[in-house]
Amino acid sequence: MSLGGCSLPQSRQNPASPQPLSISPQSDRTAAIPANPTDPNFVVAAVQKVGPAVVRINAARTVSSQIPDEFDDPVMRRFFGSAPPARRVERGTGSGFIINANGQILTNSHVVNGADTVSVTLKDGRDFRGEVVGEDPVTDVAVIKIDASELPVVPIGNSSVLQPGEWVIAIGNPLGLDNTVTAGIISATDRSSSAIGVADKRVGFIQTDTAINPGNSGGPLLNARGEVIGMNTAIISGAQGLGFAIPINTVQGIAQQLITKGKVDHSYLGVQMVTLTPEIREQLEVESRGRIRVAANQGILLTRIVPNSPADDAGLQAGDVIQSINNSPVTKTEQVQQLVERAAVGSQLQLTIQRGQKSSQVAVTLESLPAQQRDQ
């Protein structure tokens, strides 16, 4: 699995002065396009309306190449001296889209991650210096600000009503080819991050067969009406017809926090877990030579408890099986992730767990996700 576009380490820039996230789905420049997929030119209409608000993002950072360990020893330094680390500039390109006429732009976090400089090129050829207002590696969303006004903006749709089979359109700058348009359908919705190989991301992805390549990252995924319903973000290496986008409803919620606070607070439980299946039970018993036996037939098996985490403080142990959270049964790890993500930092979750043959209730108070885990 790879996240398309450029991949640079986490940036620690100070957030700009907060500005409200102002997105107007209906305006003179962003009026929604009537959906008429039977019209062979409906893609053309969507692109002509939205294309001017899609931008190219160039990011650069300076990196140091460390000398190999075998050359970094006292004997070698005695004869040859100490060579300073070599420095080079890494560059990457991604896409983005303008959501506010005063220069607020959305893109992927991994497009600007760790960048020393960010520049934004509009479709009309104008270049601007970009400032990273904030980024969230956990959802792979970032906000950039440029000093401009009266810019074209994209219309925003509703990603919660999407259905497999709907037409979608992607606009971006794949492989350095600016303003590239591809089209296809929605293949699936709410595809879990673990299912596509990026388990550290807290997103239920839109899956599409629309061609998405490196450089498309951060660009818009449109519905047939020309409304943005997702942010293109990921591809599976070696696969064809498998692209993924972050639902725009998720993007908007994250962007609002980045703009107002410069960061996003994610709730944290502090466990590693797997969905319990008969195969997992059997594998666990075989590999432990019978020392570990799980009595539960289904639920969420905790395989590790992070030290000093909320789960650790609440007394949870590896081998416990979560049966329900707040009286809602859980049978897949994605359900636990969603419930934790939706709960506020500082709130309490009531877990029903099975330990051996016994069932009990455990209250866990969620904390904010530690910074070092956000960047992994």
Image: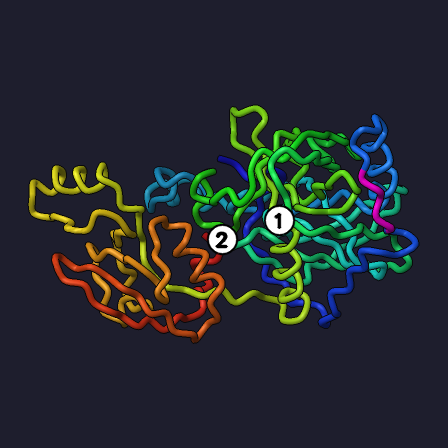
Residue that label 2 marks: 202
Image location of residue 167, percent across then percent down:
70, 34
Q: Nearer the viewer, mark 1 or mark 2?
A: 1
Give me the residue at 70% from left, 36% from top.
168
Give me the residue at 52% from left, 67% from top.
265
Q: Is residue 33 magenta?
A: yes
Q: Amino acid at mark 1?
A: Pro
Q: Is residue 103 magenta?
A: no
Q: Above or below — where is 68 with respect to 310? A: above
Mark on residue 349?
none
Image location of residue 328, percent across then percent down:
37, 61
Image location of residue 356, percent across then percent down:
13, 57
**Residue 13 vs residue 228, the one in the foreground:** 228
**Residue 1 vs residue 67, the one in the foreground:** 1
Q: Above or below — where is 231 with respect to 146? A: above
Magenta residues, start to end? 31-35
Q: Amino acid at mark 2?
A: Arg
Residue that label 1 marks: 247
Give me the residue at 80% from left, 39% from top.
35
Is disc 1 surrounded by few (<14), some (14 to 19) or many (20+) residues within 10 Å? Answer: many
Main secondary structure found in the magenta portion: loop
Q: CA distance from mark 1 to mark 2?
A: 12 Å
